[in-house]
C-alpha cells in the first residue's frame, strides 16, 4: 500500500526470518508493481469501501464487485480513458475512432466552444510491461480449412 509499512524494520525482520528477499524499485520504496499499487489506491478510495468487513465472505463479495467494476467500467487514465476489457479484447482503436467522430461532430456544430484547437480523444494505449520478455510471443494464425486434394 504505497509504503512505509513495507519498508519498516518489523516487516524487514519478518521477511528475513522467513527467508524472503525484499525488492524495491528504488531504495526504500515498496512500489515494485505500479499497476497493482494504482489498483489498490482505486480500491481504497472508492466511496463504498467499508472501514471494516463483517466477514471474509463479505470482503470477497465486495472485491468481486469491485474488480468487475475496475475491469469493465472504470476508465483508466493510463490507457486512454478506456476500460481494461476494451483494451484486452482489441477494441481500443474502434472506441477511439467512435470518440473522434463524436468530437468532430461537436467541433463542427460549435467550433467556438473549442478555443485552442479541435478536440481529439486520448491516444490509444501502447503495450506496457513490468518485465518485458526478450521477444513478445505472437499469436498463432487462426486455423483454416484444409485445402481439398
Image: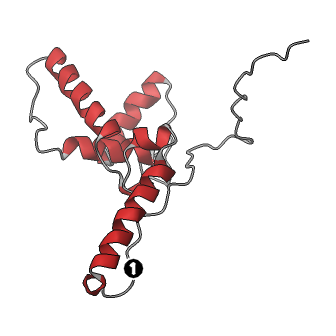
Q: Is residue 62 left or right of residue 111?
A: left
In terms of depth relative to the viewer, which is nearer, 40 or 136? Answer: 136
Q: Is residue 137 above or below residue 94?
A: above
In terms of depth relative to the viewer, which is nearer, 144 or 63? Answer: 144
Q: Is residue 52 left or right of residue 15?
A: left
Q: Residue at x 37, y 45 (%)?
A: 83
Residue 40: quarter of image: top left
Residue 36: quarter of image: top left
Q: Residue at x 22, y 28 (%)?
A: 65
Q: Residue at x 27, y 46 (%)?
A: 41
The residue that mark 1 highlights is: 118
Q: How many marks?
A: 1
The extreme right residue here reads 149
Give percent across and percent down for residue 12: 40, 37
Q: Quadrant of the C terminus?
A: top right
In terms of depth relative to the viewer, which is nearer, 10 or 63? Answer: 63
Q: Residue at x 12, y 17 (%)?
A: 55
Give percent across and percent down for residue 42: 26, 46
Amino acid at each position: 500500500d504505497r509504503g512505509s509499512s513495507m519498508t519498516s524494520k518489523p516487516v524487514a525482520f519478518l521477511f528475513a526470518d522467513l527467508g524472503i528477499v525484499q525488492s524495491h524499485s528504488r531504495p526504500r520504496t515498496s512500489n515494485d508493481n505500479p499497476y497493482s499499487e494504482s489498483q489498490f489506491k482505486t480500491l481504497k478510495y472508492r466511496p463504498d469501501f467499508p472501514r471494516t468487513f463483517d466477514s471474509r465472505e463479505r470482503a470477497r463479495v465486495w472485491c468481486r464487485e469491485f474488480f468487475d467494476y475496475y475491469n469493465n467500467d472504470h476508465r483508466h487514465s493510463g490507457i486512454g480513458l478506456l476500460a481494461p476489457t476494451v483494451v484486452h479484447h482489441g477494441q481500443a482503436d474502434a472506441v477511439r475512432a467512435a470518440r473522434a467522430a463524436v468530437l468532430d461532430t461537436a467541433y463542427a456544430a460549435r467550433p467556438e466552444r473549442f478555443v485552442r484547437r479541435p478536440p481529439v480523444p486520448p491516444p490509444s494505449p501502447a503495450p506496457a510491461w513490468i518485465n518485458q520478455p526478450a521477444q513478445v510471443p505472437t499469436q498463432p494464425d487462426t486455423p483454416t480449412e484444409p485445402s481439398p486434394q
